[in-house]
Image: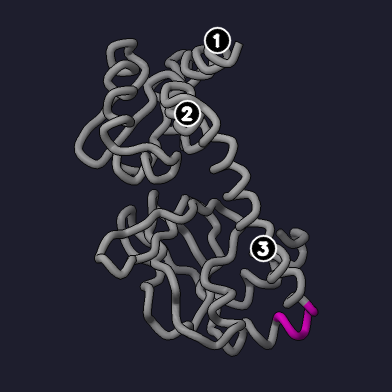
Amino acid sequence: MVSPQLWARIVAAGHPQVFARGETLLFQGDPAGHVLALLSGRVKITRLEADGSSLLLAIRHPGELLGEIAVLGGGTRTTTVTAMDECRTHVIAGDRFTSLVAELDLKDLLLRHAFQRLQQSERVSTELAALPARPRVIRGLLRLASPLPPHASAAPRQAEIGLDQTEFGEAIGLSRASVAVQLAWLRRLGLVVTRRGEIVVTDVGRLQELSETLDG
Protein backbone atom coordinates (compact mmCIF):
# COMPACT_ATOMS: atom_id res chain seq x y z
CA MET A 1 0.00 0.00 0.00
CA VAL A 2 2.73 2.49 1.04
CA SER A 3 6.50 2.29 1.18
CA PRO A 4 8.10 0.58 4.18
CA GLN A 5 9.30 3.98 5.39
CA LEU A 6 5.80 5.50 5.31
CA TRP A 7 4.31 2.38 6.90
CA ALA A 8 6.82 2.67 9.74
CA ARG A 9 5.80 6.32 10.25
CA ILE A 10 2.12 5.38 10.40
CA VAL A 11 2.70 2.49 12.81
CA ALA A 12 4.89 4.64 15.05
CA ALA A 13 2.02 7.11 15.45
CA GLY A 14 0.00 4.55 17.42
CA HIS A 15 0.26 2.24 20.39
CA PRO A 16 0.23 -1.58 20.31
CA GLN A 17 -2.88 -3.63 20.97
CA VAL A 18 -3.38 -7.38 20.54
CA PHE A 19 -6.76 -8.91 19.70
CA ALA A 20 -7.56 -12.56 20.34
CA ARG A 21 -9.02 -14.77 17.64
CA GLY A 22 -12.75 -14.06 17.39
CA GLU A 23 -12.47 -10.67 19.08
CA THR A 24 -14.03 -7.65 17.38
CA LEU A 25 -11.60 -4.91 16.40
CA LEU A 26 -14.12 -2.41 15.00
CA PHE A 27 -17.91 -2.33 15.35
CA GLN A 28 -20.37 -1.31 12.63
CA GLY A 29 -22.23 1.83 13.70
CA ASP A 30 -19.58 3.07 16.13
CA PRO A 31 -18.07 6.55 15.73
CA ALA A 32 -14.85 6.42 13.71
CA GLY A 33 -12.41 7.66 16.33
CA HIS A 34 -9.28 5.70 15.46
CA VAL A 35 -7.48 3.65 12.82
CA LEU A 36 -5.79 0.27 13.20
CA ALA A 37 -2.57 -0.75 11.47
CA LEU A 38 -2.62 -4.55 11.11
CA LEU A 39 0.83 -6.02 11.81
CA SER A 40 0.03 -9.74 12.02
CA GLY A 41 -2.97 -12.03 11.67
CA ARG A 42 -6.02 -11.88 9.42
CA VAL A 43 -9.34 -10.11 9.89
CA LYS A 44 -12.72 -10.50 8.24
CA ILE A 45 -14.86 -7.54 7.21
CA THR A 46 -18.61 -8.08 7.59
CA ARG A 47 -21.72 -5.92 7.26
CA LEU A 48 -24.98 -6.38 9.15
CA GLU A 49 -27.85 -6.26 6.66
CA ALA A 50 -31.35 -4.86 7.25
CA ASP A 51 -32.79 -8.38 7.60
CA GLY A 52 -30.36 -9.15 10.43
CA SER A 53 -28.03 -11.34 8.38
CA SER A 54 -24.27 -10.81 8.32
CA LEU A 55 -22.54 -10.54 4.93
CA LEU A 56 -18.83 -11.30 4.54
CA LEU A 57 -17.29 -8.56 2.39
CA ALA A 58 -13.54 -9.13 2.51
CA ILE A 59 -10.53 -10.55 4.33
CA ARG A 60 -7.58 -8.34 5.17
CA HIS A 61 -3.96 -9.29 5.86
CA PRO A 62 -0.93 -7.75 7.59
CA GLY A 63 0.22 -4.44 6.14
CA GLU A 64 -3.31 -3.07 5.85
CA LEU A 65 -4.99 -0.13 7.57
CA LEU A 66 -8.41 -0.78 9.07
CA GLY A 67 -11.08 1.88 9.48
CA GLU A 68 -9.12 4.62 7.76
CA ILE A 69 -11.79 5.67 5.25
CA ALA A 70 -14.41 6.21 7.97
CA VAL A 71 -11.94 8.36 9.91
CA LEU A 72 -11.06 10.43 6.84
CA GLY A 73 -14.76 10.83 6.06
CA GLY A 74 -15.67 11.75 9.62
CA GLY A 75 -18.56 9.30 9.79
CA THR A 76 -19.48 6.08 11.58
CA ARG A 77 -18.20 2.57 10.93
CA THR A 78 -20.06 0.92 8.05
CA THR A 79 -18.65 -2.56 8.71
CA THR A 80 -17.49 -4.80 11.55
CA VAL A 81 -13.91 -6.11 11.66
CA THR A 82 -13.25 -9.41 13.48
CA ALA A 83 -9.97 -11.23 14.16
CA MET A 84 -9.62 -14.55 12.34
CA ASP A 85 -6.31 -15.20 14.12
CA GLU A 86 -4.56 -13.51 17.01
CA CYS A 87 -3.91 -10.05 15.58
CA ARG A 88 -1.20 -7.57 16.52
CA THR A 89 -2.14 -3.99 15.70
CA HIS A 90 -1.17 -0.42 16.40
CA VAL A 91 -4.06 1.89 17.35
CA ILE A 92 -3.79 5.40 15.91
CA ALA A 93 -6.07 8.17 17.23
CA GLY A 94 -8.25 9.71 14.53
CA ASP A 95 -6.92 13.26 14.86
CA ARG A 96 -3.33 12.01 14.89
CA PHE A 97 -4.03 9.93 11.78
CA THR A 98 -5.65 12.77 9.82
CA SER A 99 -2.75 15.07 10.74
CA LEU A 100 -0.27 12.43 9.57
CA VAL A 101 -2.16 11.91 6.32
CA ALA A 102 -2.03 15.65 5.64
CA GLU A 103 1.64 15.87 6.62
CA LEU A 104 2.64 12.97 4.36
CA ASP A 105 0.12 13.86 1.59
CA LEU A 106 -1.43 10.39 1.74
CA LYS A 107 -5.16 11.03 1.26
CA ASP A 108 -5.28 10.41 -2.50
CA LEU A 109 -3.11 7.31 -2.10
CA LEU A 110 -5.35 5.87 0.63
CA LEU A 111 -8.54 6.51 -1.35
CA ARG A 112 -6.98 4.99 -4.46
CA HIS A 113 -5.88 1.94 -2.48
CA ALA A 114 -9.39 1.50 -1.04
CA PHE A 115 -10.79 1.57 -4.59
CA GLN A 116 -8.17 -0.94 -5.76
CA ARG A 117 -9.05 -3.28 -2.88
CA LEU A 118 -12.68 -3.17 -3.99
CA GLN A 119 -11.70 -3.88 -7.60
CA GLN A 120 -9.50 -6.79 -6.52
CA SER A 121 -12.31 -8.34 -4.46
CA GLU A 122 -14.64 -8.04 -7.44
CA ARG A 123 -12.06 -9.65 -9.77
CA VAL A 124 -11.60 -12.61 -7.41
CA SER A 125 -15.37 -13.02 -7.06
CA THR A 126 -15.81 -12.94 -10.84
CA GLU A 127 -13.00 -15.47 -11.36
CA LEU A 128 -14.41 -17.88 -8.78
CA ALA A 129 -17.99 -17.47 -10.02
CA ALA A 130 -16.95 -18.87 -13.41
CA LEU A 131 -15.79 -22.16 -11.84
CA PRO A 132 -17.86 -25.25 -10.98
CA ALA A 133 -18.36 -25.93 -7.27
CA ARG A 134 -15.47 -28.38 -6.76
CA PRO A 135 -12.59 -26.32 -8.21
CA ARG A 136 -14.15 -23.20 -6.71
CA VAL A 137 -14.02 -24.68 -3.20
CA ILE A 138 -10.45 -25.94 -3.69
CA ARG A 139 -9.19 -22.65 -5.08
CA GLY A 140 -10.99 -20.77 -2.32
CA LEU A 141 -9.31 -22.93 0.32
CA LEU A 142 -5.90 -22.30 -1.20
CA ARG A 143 -6.49 -18.54 -1.34
CA LEU A 144 -7.52 -18.36 2.32
CA ALA A 145 -5.07 -20.89 3.76
CA SER A 146 -3.06 -19.58 6.71
CA PRO A 147 -0.20 -21.93 7.73
CA LEU A 148 -0.31 -23.71 11.09
CA PRO A 149 2.93 -24.44 12.99
CA PRO A 150 4.30 -27.81 11.80
CA HIS A 151 4.40 -30.71 14.26
CA ALA A 152 7.57 -31.99 12.60
CA SER A 153 9.83 -30.68 9.88
CA ALA A 154 8.82 -33.42 7.44
CA ALA A 155 5.09 -33.12 8.11
CA PRO A 156 2.73 -31.94 5.34
CA ARG A 157 1.99 -28.23 5.58
CA GLN A 158 -1.36 -27.68 7.26
CA ALA A 159 -3.41 -24.51 7.01
CA GLU A 160 -6.37 -23.03 8.81
CA ILE A 161 -9.03 -21.21 6.81
CA GLY A 162 -10.33 -19.06 9.67
CA LEU A 163 -13.97 -19.14 8.50
CA ASP A 164 -16.89 -21.43 9.23
CA GLN A 165 -18.63 -23.18 6.34
CA THR A 166 -21.31 -20.49 5.93
CA GLU A 167 -18.74 -17.68 5.83
CA PHE A 168 -16.51 -19.66 3.48
CA GLY A 169 -19.51 -20.13 1.18
CA GLU A 170 -20.13 -16.38 1.22
CA ALA A 171 -16.48 -15.77 0.37
CA ILE A 172 -16.64 -17.93 -2.76
CA GLY A 173 -20.28 -17.44 -3.75
CA LEU A 174 -21.67 -20.88 -2.84
CA SER A 175 -24.39 -22.02 -0.47
CA ARG A 176 -23.42 -23.74 2.76
CA ALA A 177 -24.97 -26.96 1.43
CA SER A 178 -22.80 -26.89 -1.71
CA VAL A 179 -19.70 -26.19 0.38
CA ALA A 180 -20.55 -29.07 2.73
CA VAL A 181 -20.80 -31.53 -0.18
CA GLN A 182 -17.36 -30.60 -1.52
CA LEU A 183 -15.74 -30.54 1.92
CA ALA A 184 -17.13 -34.02 2.58
CA TRP A 185 -15.43 -35.22 -0.62
CA LEU A 186 -12.15 -33.58 0.44
CA ARG A 187 -12.47 -35.16 3.90
CA ARG A 188 -12.71 -38.59 2.28
CA LEU A 189 -9.46 -37.81 0.46
CA GLY A 190 -7.85 -36.85 3.76
CA LEU A 191 -7.24 -33.27 2.62
CA VAL A 192 -9.41 -31.36 5.09
CA VAL A 193 -10.70 -31.66 8.62
CA THR A 194 -13.86 -29.84 9.64
CA ARG A 195 -14.90 -29.04 13.17
CA ARG A 196 -17.48 -26.69 14.59
CA GLY A 197 -16.74 -23.29 13.08
CA GLU A 198 -13.43 -24.44 11.64
CA ILE A 199 -11.94 -25.75 8.39
CA VAL A 200 -8.35 -27.03 8.33
CA VAL A 201 -6.46 -28.10 5.21
CA THR A 202 -4.31 -31.07 6.25
CA ASP A 203 -1.95 -31.05 3.26
CA VAL A 204 -1.66 -27.82 1.27
CA GLY A 205 0.75 -29.38 -1.24
CA ARG A 206 -1.60 -32.22 -2.16
CA LEU A 207 -4.53 -29.81 -2.38
CA GLN A 208 -2.52 -27.62 -4.77
CA GLU A 209 -1.74 -30.68 -6.90
CA LEU A 210 -5.43 -31.59 -6.96
CA SER A 211 -6.31 -28.05 -8.02
CA GLU A 212 -3.82 -28.21 -10.90
CA THR A 213 -5.24 -31.59 -11.95
CA LEU A 214 -8.78 -30.20 -12.07
CA ASP A 215 -7.62 -27.08 -13.93
CA GLY A 216 -5.89 -29.26 -16.49
Which of the 4 image quarters holds residue 37?
bottom right
For badge 1, the amino acid type reads: Thr
For badge 3, the amino acid type reads: Phe
Q: Which image quadrant: the N terminus?
A: bottom right
Residue denoted by label 2: 136
| Element type where label 2 sits in the image | helix
Residue positioned 75% across, 85% down in the render: 102
Secondary structure of the magenta portion, mostly? helix
Give the mark, 3 or 2, whose residue is nearer the N terminus.
Answer: 3
Q: Residue 115, which numbered label? A: 3
Does 106 lie within the magenta span? no
| Element type where label 3 sits in the image | helix
Residue 4, percent across and down?
Answer: 74, 59
Segment colored magenta: 101-105
Residue 158, percent across and down?
Answer: 41, 25
| Element type where label 1 sits in the image | helix
Residue denoted by label 1: 213
Which of the 4 image quarters holds residue 169?
top left
Q: CA distance from mark 3 to mark 1?
A: 34 Å
Q: Is residue 98 left or right of residue 153?
A: right
Q: Is residue 43 left or right of residue 185?
A: right
